[in-house]
Amino acid sequence: MRPAEAGRPRFFPLRELLLGCILTNIVLALIFTPMSVTTLWQNLVYNHTISGSILLLEELVRRRFWGQSWPPRHWMALLMLVAVPLGGAIGLALGSWLTDTSPMDGPLPLSAAANLWIVLTITLAASGVLLGGLWQRSRLLEARASAQAAQRGQTLAELHALQAQVEPHFLFNTLAHLDALISQPTRHEARALLSHLTDYLHRTQPTARPAASQLSDELARIEPWLHILAIRFGARLRWRIHASQQAASCQLPPMLLQPLVENAIRHGIEPAVQGGELSIYADLYDSALHIRVCDNGVGLNAPNARPGAGSGLANIRARLAALYGHAASLTLTPLAPHGVEARLILPAHYADHTPLSDR
């Protein structure tokens, strides 16, 4: 025998076991009191002492060798074969001492002996059915947890793939523009571009991207990126960011906001001849973090709109569903006279994982 194996279903908490044991004892006492020679109170005491002793022995051995996991079936059967008679004898002696009765003294009447065997048989059968049900439920919960872990792993892999697609494309374009600036009498713009690129690469290296960061961290990564784009686009791109202090301190998974900003520029502002303005707003409403990415570009149904926006939005929605379920959403709304607002809503949690509603 050895400590708990990672692949085995987790056993139920002791609190749940005790609650189930108490409720079962009460039901059995109510059922079998009319069939026994003892009172309801005595049956309750005996049921609790016997089942409690069995449970104590079972838990001591199981936790010693298997921790929080279910033992293999053959070990569980052997454990119960030992714990039931031994714990039953201990519980019977303890119940006799507490009730000052000795139901086993002297020969039992034939009817009482038959009733005792009936009670023991039904109790053991009920215990077997209960353990089987608990086993199946544990396996179901374990399978569900494994599926959720696999989904999170797939989402993380897709996130890394998205980062690998976004950053080289952006980097190559920036270096090409830097080469063009250096060859022209615009050295100050080249130095500014190089400075912003260095800042961007420093903030977006893998060690600087935890699994969960604050909105302020994500905005700090986006700002040098927008500075670079502003140099490349010139007067065709204007941008601003407004985030309240509370919103900035909320958690935000990485690569949720940047694809929305890139989508607004690539599919909204860049196709527009006159360019446009990008605005990012973040605030808290009703214990939820609201982030709006607005542009006054060509809009959703523009004839010269670039293809490919739908897949990025679908990936964001899939990540939101995996992380928050139905508590988060992403919606697109047309703006007048032209442009799009992307609104991201998710539960507001601070960096210490505390929900806003608990503050």
Image (tube, helix red, strand yellow):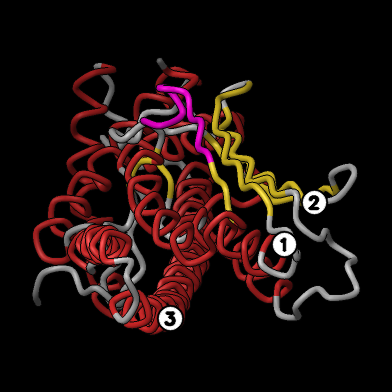
Q: Give coordinates of residue 346: x percent, y percent.
A: 58, 41
Q: Earlier in the sequence, mark 2 or mark 3?
A: 3
Q: Which residue is mark 2?
A: 339
Q: CA distance from mark 3 to mark 1?
A: 19 Å
Identify which residue is drawn at 84% across, 76% down: 304
Quick one: quadrant of the C terminus? top left
Q: Earlier in the sequence, mark 2 or mark 1?
A: 1
**Mark 1 belongs to which amino acid?**
Gly
Q: Is residue 146 depicted above or below 275 in this figure?
A: below
Q: Which residue is mark 1?
A: 268
**CA neighbours of label 3 inside 10 A, class few (<14), some (14 to 19), many (20+):** few
Identify which residue is drawn at 70% across, 68% down: 267
Q: CA distance from mark 2 to mark 1?
A: 7 Å
Quick one: quadrant of the N terminus? bottom left
The region drawn magenta spans 240-249
Q: Mark 2 against mark 3, which lies toward the viewer?
A: 3
**CA neighbours of label 2 inside 10 A, class few (<14), some (14 to 19), many (20+):** many
Q: Is residue 241 depicted above or below 205 in this figure?
A: above
Seen in the image, is 328 located left or right of residue 128? right
Element type where label 3 sits in the image: helix
**Residue at far front of view:** 185
**Mark 3 belongs to which amino acid?**
Asn
Q: Are the residues at dot 2 and dot 1 in contact (C-beta closer than 8 Å)?
A: yes
Element type where label 1 sits in the image: helix
Q: Which residue is mark 3?
A: 173
Identify which residue is drawn at 59% across, 39% down: 291
